[in-house]
Amino acid sequence: MAIEVKNISYTYPGSTVTAVENVSMKIEKGERVAIIGQNGAGKSTTVKLMNNIYKPTSGKIIIDGINTKDQTTAQTAPHVGYVFQNPNDQIFNDDVIKEIEYVLRYWKLPEEEIKRRREEAIDVTGIRPYLEMHPFDIPLPIRKFLTIAVVVAVSPDYVILDEPTAGQDLWGCAQLRKVMDYLQSKGKTVITISHDMEYVAENFERVIVMAHKNVIADGKKEDIFYQRNELQEAYVKPPLSTQIAQEIGIKKKVLNMQELIAINNS
């Protein structure tokens, strides 16, 4: 069970501009993977190809053995959920409960199952205080958790979060960890695009680096954040603790401030 990306390229329709070129990766069921790189590296296009929002110009995406070229976006969505960077791009109901239940009712699930999924999604995302509000009256960072709640309720095997920490405070980042822990406890795969390296180092074991519309590095976080050449090529800086450790000559690989302080005090 995996998402297999096999030599995909994508050129925008009616254009000669290529967004990704010969990208390959395999993400196994239950993994937690971060994709990093500067804007224009091809990250968002790659995950939208996984979700079948776009179809590859060449190459193929295989989801649990099924080629997405043979599916519509609607057929892929129950298996690969996508949370956009801007929640306004996803919300279309004027009621929070209706937003969460929309797909479940479209599927004609039993009322008990709809309630169970709705309540679980509300609790894990922490949005219960906002249920009586119009979705567009909810603060933008919390609104993102509404779109996450929709995906949690749908319960796809693969969940893609596009820049989830953007605009989030400490509560929001802690809540995101709770959501990801919940998803992983259910055997779900979590794929995140992020420019927040502290968040990536704290929450992900595997990191994929993209630059020049392709993958230039893929491995464990402690290895990736010490690959200086690849990070420079991708215009990515490692976590601040890693930078400090390198500057003062600490040989051990450091990924957070707690590790740095512990080494410094030893």
Image: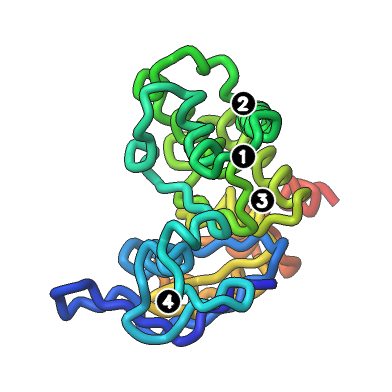
Figure quadrant of the N terminus: bottom right
Q: Earlier in the sequence, mark 3 or mark 4?
A: 4
213 relative to 129 in the view: left or right: left
Q: Which residue is mark 4?
A: 69
- The front one of 30 and 39 is 30
Q: Which residue is mark 3?
A: 202
Check whether the beta carbons of the residues at disc 2 and disc 1 lie within 8 A of each other.
Answer: no
Q: Are there few (<14), some (14-19), or many (20+) residues within 10 Å of tag 4?
A: some
58 relative to 50 in the view: left or right: left
**Front of the two marks 2 and 1:** 1
Q: Which residue is mark 1?
A: 109
Q: Earlier in the sequence, mark 1 or mark 3?
A: 1
Q: Type of residue at label 1?
A: Leu
- The front one of 248 and 19 is 19
Locate residue 241, reporting x and y percent. Answer: 62, 53
Q: How many marks?
A: 4
For the residues labelled 3 and 4, the Cα–Cα distance comes to 35 Å
Q: Earlier in the sequence, mark 2 or mark 1?
A: 1
For the residues labelled 4 and 2, the Cα–Cα distance comes to 36 Å
Q: Which residue is mark 2?
A: 126
Say what secondary structure mark 1 lies in: loop
For the residues labelled 1 and 3, the Cα–Cα distance comes to 37 Å
Which residue reaches farthest right?
266
* Residue plotted at (57% across, 61% down): 34
Residue 149, visible in the rendered structure = yes
